[in-house]
Amino acid sequence: MSTENGQARGPALRILQLYPEQMNIYGDWGNTLTLQRRAQWAGFEVELLEHEIGGQMPSDVDLVVGGGGQDSGQVAIAPDLRRHGAQLREWAEADVPMLMICGSYQLFGHVFVPAAQDAGSEPLQGISILDVETRGSAQRLIGNLTVRTEQFGEVVGYENHSGLTSLGPDATALGRVAPFGEEDSTAGGNNGADGTEGAISRNVIGTYLHGALLPKNPVLADWLLGKAVLHRTGEDRYRAPEIDESITREARRVAMSRPR
Ligand code: GLN
């Protein structure tokens, strides 16, 4: 359905999934699938790439995604992620769009200190693409969440994490937790205290929202793909695919109507 004459609108987009074996919980793979499908429906070919522990990073990419994971998974990937930290920081500074969910979000910050009861609280040094720090707590933040953002409107998803994240001076929150009915609007998000959720710096987004996130938030998927096409072609060529989004709207309505 992509283009008038069926020709692809441009060179293939290279989408890189970081550590799909260890960092892929609560349906996070659905983010990669959504990006792939929306790009194809918009007329772009897609090359899906994966990076696992001990592997080589591909030469150039147009979009990087990372999912959530248990503390043990983060312990496993952290040394390898640091080995490739310079490359990932270089891509981030070159405005390559990135979406990091929960455990990956935490390791894109400066440090993640797992909760003692989980992985023995050895601090895991992150790769400092986002100015955030995370400390594991005995209390997990679990539940449905709607986040009000300036750039993407209301973003809806599900969170489940022990890590409490604080934003540094150079970090901008992705948004603020929306109150659910009479519920306290600071419940959940980065730390369950300051009402913020996620972080955004240049084209790098970190968030605690699983689900997967992108199927219920196509505006965010299209923003990421727009930045990816700009990176690949140097032109603002991406246009959201004209598809029936009625199921998306219904899924959002249901997700937003569910209490935490
Ligand atoms: N293991 C991390 C935590 O508990 C991340 C969890 C996740 O990715 N859902 O905070």
Image: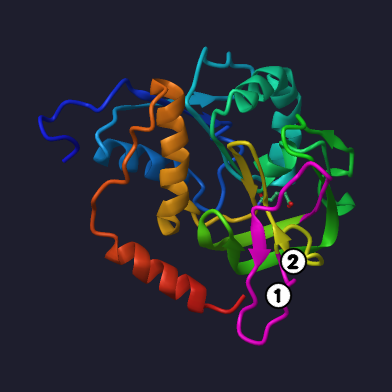
Q: Which residue is drawn at 65% across and 18% down?
A: 87
Judged from this view, the residue extending furthest toward the front is 235
Q: Is mark 1 on a helix, strand or loop?
A: loop
Left or right of 56 in this view: 221:
left
Q: Residue at x 25, y 28 (%)?
A: 9
- For residue 30, say whether it is visible: no
Where is residue 37? Give x, y as percent. Answer: 32, 41
- Up the image or down, 174 lies above or below 84; here it is below
Q: Splitting the image into 4 quarters, where does residue 215 fall?
A: bottom left
Q: Does the magenta stretch include residue 183?
A: yes
Q: What residue type is labelled 2?
A: Gly
Left or right of 237 in this view: 181:
right
Q: Mark number for residue 195?
A: 2
Q: Does the magenta stretch include residue 130?
A: no
- For residue 201, say whether it is visible: yes
Judged from this view, the residue extending furthest toward the bottom is 182
Judge by depth and name the residue closer to the eye, 39 or 227.
227
Q: Please, what is the dominant secondary structure of the magenta stretch? A: loop
Whether label 2 lies within 8 Å of ligand 1 gets the answer: no
Mark 1, residue position: 185
Left or right of 92 in this view: 75:
right
Segment tinted magenta in the rendering: 163-188
User: For mark 2, does the 10 Å Cα neighbourhood hold few (<14), some (14 to 19), or many (20 or more) residues?
Assistant: many
Gap between marks 1 and 2, in whole Å? Answer: 6 Å
Left or right of 249 in this view: 128:
right
- Up the image or down, 23 lies above or below 192; here it is above
Query: Would you say the residues marked 1 and 2 are in contact, meaning their CB atoms lie under 8 Å apart?
Result: yes
Q: Quadrant of the N terminus?
A: top left
